[in-house]
């Protein structure tokens, strides 16, 4: 190939990249406008049951996507964490008809802080134990946490009420949950954007880059002097912070919380959302949550009845099949499908997927600024062992 | 400082273990019969856990597949045996009577048990061949596949069998309880459940240590690629291991369905118990599974009865003791008691 030809092809590629970047920006702007004006566009029901639900589920799923993508930790404990946050808040605030729970009658905002704080403390302690396990072991230990928290709240009725804590009071500006879904929608939207920006920022800090190093080769990071368990524990705690926000929002959304809200089904739902969306990008969490809410809503109306195998009530079978197909065919979820389609349209092979699921098949990409802090320098995250 | 910090968990844990032993000794001296009863409950429960968890650990040890559908196979086995028993062995309308007036022959228990066990083995084999075989080596992806399977199974079983607890009848010719002096204990639990667990444990031991298959499996656990290079048909070994592991889940389902009941939710419960057992015992170790099962059975059984201090009744919090057990073991041995790094 001559130098001129190389130059031309490089220019072509740059043009293509520019064009796709512009198209991406346009799509992003359109989505932003629709999301901002959603209360004016959609019916109250759609706004609440699809969009608001997708936003808070997306926050919960993004905590898992963050841990999986940047920490190599597929955690099934996120629902346990958000359950702890939700129950902690529901117990300390005023419940309208004093149904169940401790009903301490604190201010809702104090309740929020308490809920998040309790979840963070428990997540830190649990993370300190679980952070020494990797891969499939980590998944199992966090699944055990999730199940145990569920059975705990199922058994300890002093904390969970009989069949849940209902009518949990919310901050006044949220208004009536049924007739005024708009304030909660904007709160969920704001939280989603804040969480997304925070996580994007964190993975570019020295801490985030070290975390990705730990994901790729924890032995090597350890021999470079990094405190690997501490990095993983702190990442788990950060994920827990995000999950706790989702827990608070879920209680506001449902106005109640019961052991049933944190059943294994919910744990698996969050996993399904993350995987359907795509574990390789944080945006996948919200995309997956949107798809999940849509499938949930429409499958209950349009599913044909096939004996006792399939029917409108059998959402689990449908979502299970969708999940199975995604895992089998496109481990990168909808994001992966989108990238492949874009690749086909642009006439090149799809981008290498970096899904944590097919780990080991290829080198993962480290995101972050070009200069990685030198191992021996003092610019590290300050969490090295002395 | 560092040395102290490293040593302190062990000191704390030894103190904790000592306190538990002393506390149990006090309980034992207070009520001998109750204590014996509770202990036997724990041991027999551990037996049921072992049957499920040994299948789980066999599959994991060889193939690095965490079979999250093990709990679903367990529950499905129970339902199959229940269906077989009610359809093939119901004598006239007597199945509607709730009393034990109808007679249940030995065959009416054994045939459904064998049927259910065999079918579950084949179902497991189908899952492995149809879904897992192509993703060999991607353990997280395989775990997610089995999770998807368990979601579908749970929903389908609920749709087909409903949410009401059923129970498999034990043969009426078998005694209800064993009596030693004034002490009674359930015959089925003690003889069939515990006996099955012991027989399965011994058979697995012989299979692993004395047969060519076992030799291949043990070699496969250490180095699959090398085993394959030596000319062993690894796929066949994987299929056999998955079949046996699923058989065990199915049989445990029959045991559980006779001993307790067949009800939605038991799949999750037994999945949790298998997870705890293998986390404690170490993934892939049969000795670990045996010790883990026994420990978990005893801890659950004791804490359900004895978690009372003076007037404060903490038995509601019994679930936490299983968790404490996991934490205690993991704090000392992150890979479980008999776990080895992969």
Image: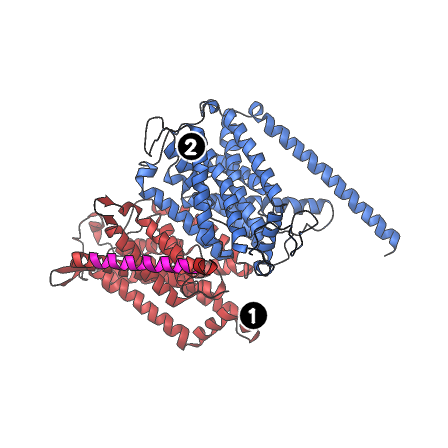
Q: Number of marks in the image?
A: 2
Q: Secondary structure at mark 2?
A: helix
Checking the image for residue B170, the label placed there is none
Residue B175 sits above or below residue B157 on the image: below
**Picture coordinates of residue B119, whole percent (x, y):** 38, 60
Please give the chain letter of the residue carrying mark 1.
B
Which of A248 and A3 lies nearest the eye of the viewer? A248
Residue B306 part of the magenta segment: no
**Picture coordinates of residue A92, whole percent (x, y):** 38, 33
Checking the image for residue B225, the label placed there is 1
Query: Can residue B116 be seen by looking at this rendering?
Result: no
Residue in the picture at 52% in, 52% down: A230
In the figure, the shade used to draw chain A is blue
Q: Residue furthest left?
A: B181
Please give the chain letter of the residue carrying mark 2.
A
Residue in the picture at 52% in, 54% down: A229
Reading the image, the residue beneath label 2 is A111
Q: Magenta span covers which residues?
A: B7-27
**Picture coordinates of residue A370, whole percent (x, y):** 70, 49
In the figure, the shade used to draw chain B is red
Classify residue B305 as left or right of residue A109: left
């Amino acid at each position: 190939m001559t130098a001129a030809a190389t130059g031309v092809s490089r220019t072509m590629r740059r043009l293509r990249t520019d064009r796709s970047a512009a198209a991406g920006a346009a799509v992003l702007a359109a989505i932003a406008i629709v999301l901002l004006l959603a209360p004016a566009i959609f019916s109250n029901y759609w706004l609440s049951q699809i969009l608001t639900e997708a936003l808070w589920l997306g926050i919960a799923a993004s905590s898992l996507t963050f841990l999986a993508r940047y920490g190599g930790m597929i955690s099934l404990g996120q629902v346990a964490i958000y359950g702890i946050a939700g129950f902690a808040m529901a117990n300390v605030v005023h419940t309208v008809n004093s149904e169940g729970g401790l009903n301490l009658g604190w201010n809702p905002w104090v309740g929020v802080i308490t809920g998040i704080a309790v979840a963070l403390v428990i997540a830190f302690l649990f993370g300190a134990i679980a952070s020494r396990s990797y891969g499939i072991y980590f998944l199992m230990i966090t699944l055990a946490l999730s199940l145990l928290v569920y059975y705990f709240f199922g058994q300890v009725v002093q904390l969970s009420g009989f069949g849940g804590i209902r009518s949990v009071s919310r901050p006044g500006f949220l208004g009536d949950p049924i007739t005024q879904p708009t304030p909660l929608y904007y709160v969920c939207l704001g939280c989603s954007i804040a969480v997304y920006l925070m996580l994007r920022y964190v993975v570019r800090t020295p801490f985030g880059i070290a975390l990705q190093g730990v994901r790729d080769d924890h032995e090597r990071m350890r021999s470079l002097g990094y405190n690997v368990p501490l990095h993983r524990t702190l990442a788990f705690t950060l994920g827990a912070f995000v999950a706790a926000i989702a827990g608070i929002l879920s209680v506001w959304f449902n106005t109640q919380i019961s052991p049933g809200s944190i059943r294994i089904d919910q744990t698996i739902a969050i996993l399904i959302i993350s995987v359907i969306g795509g574990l390789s990008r944080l945006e996948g969490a919200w995309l997956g949550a949107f798809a999940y809410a849509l499938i949930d809503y429409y499958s209950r109306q349009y599913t044909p009845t096939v004996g006792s195998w399939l029917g409108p009530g059998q959402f689990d079978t449908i979502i299970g099949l969708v999940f199975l197909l995604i895992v089998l065919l496109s481990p990168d979820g909808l994001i992966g499908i989108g990238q492949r389609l874009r690749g086909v349209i642009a006439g090149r092979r799809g981008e290498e997927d970096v899904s944590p699921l097919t780990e080991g098949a290829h080198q993962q990409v480290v995101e972050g600024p070009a200069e990685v802090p030198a191992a021996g320098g003092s610019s590290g995250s300050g969490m090295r062992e002395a | 400082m560092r040395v102290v910090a490293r040593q302190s968990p062990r000191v704390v844990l030894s103190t904790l273990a000592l306190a538990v032993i002393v506390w149990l000794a006090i309980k034992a001296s207070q009520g001998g019969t109750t204590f014996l009863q509770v202990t036997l409950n724990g041991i027999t429960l551990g037996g049921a856990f072992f049957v499920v968890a040994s299948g789980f650990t066999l599959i994991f040890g060889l193939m690095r597949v965490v079979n999250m559908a093990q709990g679903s196979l367990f529950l499905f086995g129970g339902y199959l045996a229940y269906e077989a028993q009610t359809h093939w062995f119901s004598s006239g309308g007597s199945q509607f009577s709730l009393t034990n007036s109808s007679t249940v022959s030995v065959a009416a228990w054994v045939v459904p048990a064998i049927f259910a066990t065999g079918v579950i083995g084949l179902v497991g084999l189908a899952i492995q061949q149809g879904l897992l075989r192509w993703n060999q080596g991607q353990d997280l992806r395989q775990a997610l596949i089995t999770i998807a399977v368990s979601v579908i199974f749970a929903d389908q079983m609920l749709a087909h069998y409903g949410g009401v607890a059923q129970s498999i009848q034990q043969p009426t010719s078998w005694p209800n309880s064993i009596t030693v002096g004034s002490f009674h204990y359930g015959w089925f639990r003690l003889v069939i459940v515990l006996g099955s667990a012991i027989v399965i444990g011994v058979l697995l031991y012989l299979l692993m240590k004395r047969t060519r298959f076992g030799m291949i499996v043990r070699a496969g656990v250490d180095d699959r690629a090398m085993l394959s290079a030596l000319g062993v048909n690894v796929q066949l070994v994987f299929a056999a291991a998955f079949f046996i592991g699923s058989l065990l889940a199915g049989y445990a389902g029959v045991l559980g369905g006779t001993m307790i009941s067949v009800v939605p939710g038991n799949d999750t419960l037994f999945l949790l118990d298998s997870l705890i057992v293998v986390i404690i015992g170490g993934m892939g170790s049969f000795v670990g599974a045996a010790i883990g099962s026994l420990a978990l059975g005893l801890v659950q059984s004791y804490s359900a009865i004895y978690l009372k201090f003076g007037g404060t009744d903490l038995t509601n919090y019994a679930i936490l003791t299983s968790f404490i057990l996991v934490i205690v073991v993991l704090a000392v041995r992150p890979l479980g008691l008999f776990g080895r790094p992969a």
